[in-house]
Image (tube, grey):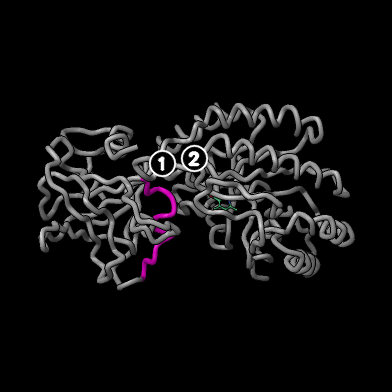
Amino acid sequence: MDAEDHVDRFGTVGGELCVGGVPLRRLTARVGSTPYFAYDRDAITARVQRLRAALGPEVELGYAVKANPMPAVVAHLAGLVDWLDVASAGEMHVALDASGAPARTSFAGPGKTDAELEQAVAAGVLVELESAGEANRVVGVGERLGVRPRVAVRVNPDFVVKGSGMRMGGGPQQFGVDVEQVPGLLDLLAERDLGLEGFHLFAGSQNLHAEIIAEAQQRTVELLLALADKAATPIRYVNLGGGFGIPYFEKDRPLDLTAVGERLRGLVAERVRPALPEAHVVIELGRFLVGEAGIYVTRVVDRKVSRGTTYLVVDGGMHHQLAASGNFGQVIRRNYPLVVGDRLGEDRGERADIVGCLCTPLDVLGTGVAVPDARVGDLVVLFQAGAYGRSASPLGFLGHPAPPEVLL
Ligand SMILES: Cc1ncc(COP(=O)(O)O)c(C=O)c1O
């Protein structure tokens, strides 16, 4: 997908990109300063509706708060999805404020501190255990508080999901309990009377291949059903992970959600329901829910030509939108889709490098981008900025102010 496709998704008025129906210059005046992030709530709602239609009524949806923890975004999603997944006590507080539903909140991630475990157990959140050591610590927390902890086991599978931008399962991992060690852990949980609700398997993220996702879900279901057989108590929670990707680069094609949905519906009907008729079957998504609904807006503060290359220097950069600079897990830097968002109708006859305001050569937002004859004051818009943007960037690097966020 190219930048034009993203412009079409948001819509335009008089040569300006719109977010939530508000043209870019007016939106910028409303925010009061650049740079900033803007998220479109209707786009998030529409995405959830599409997912519901594709996945059917048997599959519950979780939102991984780490993708975008802005409280207003989390509150909006809390009204649309079934579960919120958090990765720290900080995210847990945002999630609980938003949903008021600890029973539908899960807490995954390595390195949970005793203080975090205590807060989660006290709140009644489902703790997804990443190791035997963590299980023992949760037992201790439960005894201290006089509260029976609710737990699930995060499983590190014995297979790898190919085609993921980031892999979190298969081989040695800091995430989850190796599948071959799970039976031993189940014995410990049964002995210590922990409230085991089920299993979670998250093998990777940013996958655009429907066939690979469907195969991974099939293997995940088989593996978790085999583990469910070994559990001392009935399994009521089966979290199959997610990993649905979004198209960041020009050659990327959107995920075929219909194909994923068809296969998953069949899998749940044929394999999960006969064995576990009552279990919550959950798909846990972050970027797929919010990534495409957000933009990052910066203003051109300088234009210069150096030995034949035109540079547009903007007031934002990698300290706000690290991923677009290619420094968030990418092997080769490629451009995120971007446009001069207040001069859309104009002929894009110039090629320029768009660079941020940080004093490091890493701070590049676009190389060789076709732009109109851009001027100081123009507004540069980066798409696909709704997930892992502000909260996944080094905001303190070089001491510039943190960017505001708005949800329209
Ligand atoms: C346990 C878990 N769940 C969900 C996610 C969300 O992934 P994505 O935003 O790619 O959907 C991640 C990503 O790191 C994760 O580790």
Q: Nearer the viewer, residue 21 or 340?
A: 340
Mark before the other along the chain sequence, 2 or 1: 2
Magenta residue check for 74:
no
Q: Tell me the CA gap for discs 2 and 1.
A: 8 Å
Q: Indicate whether residue 394 is drawn in magenta.
A: yes
- Residue 132's label in the rendered image is none
Q: Locate residue 329, reporting x and y percent.
A: 45, 59
Q: Is residue 326 left or right of residue 96?
A: left
Q: Which residue is mark 1?
A: 247
Residue 172, position in %: x, y? 66, 62
Note whether 250 is above or below 376 in the view shown. Answer: above
Residue drawn at (65%, 54%) of the image: 170
Magenta segment, which residues?
A: 384-396
Q: Nearer the viewer, residue 127 or 146?
A: 127
Quadrant of the rendered image containing residue 136: bottom right
Cβ at disc 1 under 8 Å from ligand 1: no
Q: Quadrant of the C terminus?
A: top left
Q: Amino acid at mark 2?
A: Leu
In the rendered image, residue 97, in percent from the top left (x then y), is placed at: 54, 53
Quadrant where the N terminus sits is top left
In which quadrant of the rendered view does residue 391 lie? bottom left
For this rendering, which residue is in front, 117 or 98? 117
The type of residue carrying mark 1 is: Pro
Identify the residue at image location x=53%, y=39%: 79
Residue behind mark 2 = 208
Q: Secondary structure at mark 1?
A: loop
Q: Residue at x 19, y 49 (%)?
A: 379
Q: Main secondary structure of the magenta part?
A: loop
Q: Specify whether tag 2 is near ligand 1 (CB below 8 Å).
A: no
Looking at the rendered structure, the number of numbered marks drawn on it comes to 2
SS label for mark 2:
loop
On screen, residue 403 versus residue 168, left or right, reads left
